[in-house]
Structure formats: C-alpha cells, structure tokens
Image (spheres, helix red, strand yellow):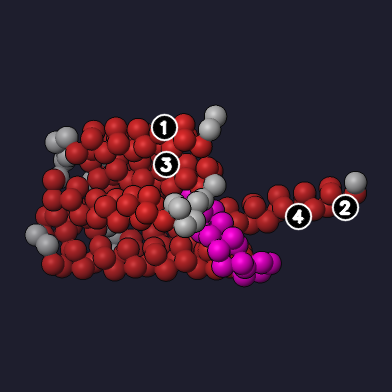
Amino acid sequence: MSRTIHYIIMGLAFFITWIWAAIEPLFFDDWLLENILVVIAVPALIWTRKKFEFSLLSYWMITIFLVLHLIGSHYTYAEVPWGVSLGEWLGTERNMYDRLIHLLFGVLLVYPLYELVVRSGNMKGFWAYFVPPMIVSAFAGFYEVLEWVAAVVVAPEAGTAFLGSQGDVWDAQKDMMLAMVGSAGVLFFIGIVKKIKCIKHKKY
C-alpha cells in the first residue's frame, strides 16, 4: 500500500471522527478548548511534511492519538463512557479515560519525537533515548499549565470540564508522570529491540 493511500485513510479517520465529535458535544465550550490542540497540530504536520516527513508508523501513532483526543473532546475527558468501564475494571470510581490518554500521549508521541531528534537533530546513543521523553515531559507540563490558565480565565463550568481533575488535587502531577512513564517505556522497548538486532547481526 502506497504512502498516499495511508495518508488518505488517516485523513478520513481523523475527519470522520472530528465531524462526529463536533455534532452536539456534551459541553460545547470544552470542545472548543480541546480543539486548540487540533487546530495547531494538524496544519503544522501538513505544512512541515515537505521539510521533514515522518515514517508511516509515526503518522499513524499521531493520528491515533488525535482521534482519541477528539473522542475526549466530544464527551469531555471526565465523561467518556469507556473511561467509566475502565475505572470499574481498575477498581476505582474515577473515569480513567483522562489517565489513559495522558499515558498514550507518551506512548504514541515519543516515537515520532525519537525519529525527529535522530534524523533531524542527528542525535545518537544516550541522548537519542533521553531527549524525546524530556520533550514529552515538557509538553505534558505545558499542557497542564494551559489547563490551569483555562480553568482560571474562561467560564467556570468550561474551565472545570477542560481541567478534568475530578477532584484530585494531584491530578496534574499524575498526568505528567503517566506521560513520562509511557514515553520511557516505549524507548526502553525500542532500545532492547535494537540491542537484540545488533547482537544477532554480529552473530552472522
């Protein structure tokens, strides 16, 4: 399957989800706030493709994250039905969709960042594995600050929905930790795989 076909499928998946999420969202003001990320990310990816084209795997990982984010924007992160079921499975009354997405923020976006620092930044060895999780951590922290600013500046109900802390005073710290754990876990796995391949190559 050609890259063009992959791009078309990704675009359709994103567009269809965006249209669905835009139809009678649970909280329209929160939907608008959540779409700030989408409005910035999608044009940036399209505009930079000619200068730096990620692998298909990276584009798919980014697309999956954006689709999951759009689902959260439709219900608000604290009200996604699947999150309730996940919370029950984990033995908590909290809607866990928010926690899942912060974990997947690290899992799904660290590999594109790894590609970026290796291919564009020409990083190797320790720094190639250290810098991407730090970038994920920085973005996660920055997003938590944006959530706090939104909660203070916009209408109280919209700010609370966007914040999605569900009464947990340590919500921001836990979200950032999950993003870091997810990103570090993925790069640890990549490092192990590359090491195994290197050992097998030497044997032959």
**Is 149 in front, or is 129?**
129
Specify whether 121 is left or right of 109.
Answer: right
Query: Quick check: 121 above or below 54?
Result: below
The alpha-carbon separation of the residues under discs 3 and 2 comes to 36 Å
Bounds of the magenta segment: 105-127
Q: Earlier in the sequence, mark 4 or mark 1?
A: 1
Residue at the spot of label 2 = 202
Q: Earlier in the sequence, mark 3 or mark 2?
A: 3
The alpha-carbon separation of the residues under discs 1 and 2 comes to 39 Å
Say which residue appears at 61% left-offset and 67% top-offset: 122
Say which residue appears at 41% left-offset and 56% top-offset: 48
Q: Position of residue 93 (x, y in %)?
A: 32, 45
The alpha-carbon separation of the residues under discs 4 and 2 comes to 11 Å
Examine the rendering and report whether any part of residue 88 can be seen.
Answer: no
Q: Position of residue 145 (x, y in %)?
A: 29, 68
User: Residue type at mark 2?
Assistant: Lys
> Mark 1 and 2 residues: CB-CB less than 8 Å, in contact?
no
* Helix, strand or loop at mark 2: helix
Q: Earlier in the sequence, mark 1 or mark 3?
A: 1
Q: Which residue is outermost to the front?
A: 50
Residue at the spot of label 1 = 9
**Is 184 in front, or is 44?**
44
**Is 168 in front, or is 24?**
24
Residue at the spot of label 4 = 195
Q: Earlier in the sequence, mark 4 or mark 2?
A: 4
